[in-house]
Amino acid sequence: MADSGALTKRIVKESARLQQEPVPGIDAIVDEHNPRYFKVVIDGPSESPYEGGKFKVELFLPDEYPMAPPKVRFMTKLYHPNIDKLGRICLDILKEKWSPALQIRTVLLSIQALLSAPNPDDFLDADVAEKWKADETGAKAIARDWTQKYARQS
């Protein structure tokens, strides 16, 4: 398969860029045993219910990458309408809006932005979305509480 060499070069190049030019508030480390697997920690954005939290995220590049989007999920439990209890993320660029022009850093920045601006109209967790729409202040209080419980590094 002729593409595998170019694909590997792209992954190596993107990985190197993440190390040389880290994204503020995001720590992405390539797994030493699998260059397609990244251990990521995203800082909760300031002035959000997730502020002060450190959210562990798993990012995996499938064999079809960059023609297919990375597989990404939160490992840290959080209260968010666009992230379900299994950590799956509802984000258009991880689905139908994916483009091979996008990169790992773009995906991570988009996830970080999603923490700043939850979208209860395009939800993955119906209960959280319902709460967010009916009582945003109460939902943010729950999100802050969960951040304190599950996303604080001790």
Image (cartoon, helix red, strand yellow):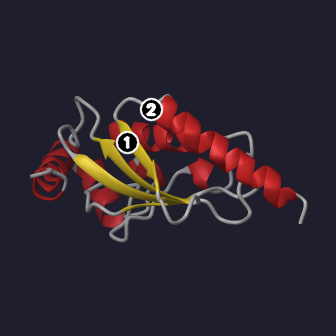
Q: Residue at x 45, y 32 (%)?
A: 22
Q: Pick out the residue farthest to the bottom.
A: 86
At 11% from the left and 51% from the top, the residue drawn is 148
Left or right position of 10 against 43: right
Front in this rendered view, residue 75 or 118: 75
Q: Nearer the viewer, residue 11 or 82?
A: 11
User: Label 1 amino acid?
Assistant: Asp
Query: Residue 74: percent from the left, percent from the top?
Result: 37, 60
**Residue position for label 2:** 22
Q: Which mark is residue 38?
A: none
Visible in this render: residue 98? no
C-alpha distance separating marks 2 and 1: 7 Å
Question: Mark 2: which secondary structure?
Answer: loop
Q: Residues within 10 Å of mark 1 (few under 14, many from 20)?
A: some
Q: Position of residue 19 (x, y in %)?
A: 48, 37
Q: How many marks?
A: 2
Residue located 24% across and 47% down the image: 54
Left or right: where 41 falls relative to 123: left
**Would you place residue 64 above or below residue 107 in this image?**
below
Q: Which residue is disc 1 drawn over?
A: 27
Q: Position of residue 24 (x, y in %)?
A: 38, 29
